[in-house]
Image: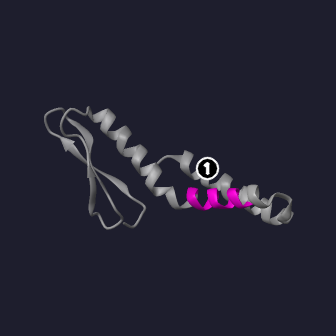
Amino acid sequence: TPTPWHIVAQANNKLGFISPSYIADINNNPIASFGGGQVHYANAHANAAFILRACNNFEGMLEALKLANLVMAKGNGLSYSDRREAHEACMQAIAKAEEGI
């Protein structure tokens, strides 16, 4: 499923607030729904935000982990620039994941 995903929200006419309705892909195809059943709307939004951060940053985090693994496996066998590149990729992936949605 293509990323980035996003939250599609709708007004809750009973309570007068906007609550997350579902998570959709870049083509607005529904992926997961929220707000039904026993989940309070604030928790539903936090859950949706967590899923978005995890899914939207998965590829970058996976690539950074692979580079970090390479550095740990080869250690000083890699050039300084290769180690620096791996470090930068890790830092960028972490920063992007910490940005939120």
Residue 90 location, quadrant: bottom right
- The residue type indicated by label 1 comes to Ile
Residue 37 falls left or right of residue 95:
left
Quadrant for the N terminus, please. Answer: bottom left
Task: Give the residue number, with chain letter if any, for mark 1.
Answer: 94
Q: Position of residue 79 (x, y in %)?
A: 85, 66
As rendered, which of 14 and 83 lies closer to the eye? 83
Picture residue at 19% right of the left edge, 40% below the top: 36
Residue 88 falls left or right of residue 47:
right
Q: Would you place residue 30 above or below residue 45 in this image?
A: below
Q: Position of residue 47 (x, y in %)?
A: 36, 40
Say how the picture is coloured. one colour
Picture residue at 14% right of the left edge, 39% below the top: 13
Q: Position of residue 55 (x, y in %)?
A: 44, 55
Mark count: 1
Q: Would you place residue 66 above or below residue 100 in this image?
A: below
Please check the rendered image and state whether residue 36 is part of the magenta-colored stretch, yes or no.
Answer: no
* Residue range highlighted in magenta: 61-70
Residue at the left extreme, as displayed: 14
Q: Position of residue 72 (x, y in %)?
A: 75, 55
Residue 30 falls left or right of residue 98:
left
- What secondary structure do most residues of the magenta stretch adopt? helix
Picture residue at 49% right of the left edge, 46% below the top: 100
Badge 1 density bin: few <14, some 14–19, many ≥20, Cα 10 Å: some
- Describe the element under mark 1 as helix, strand or loop: helix
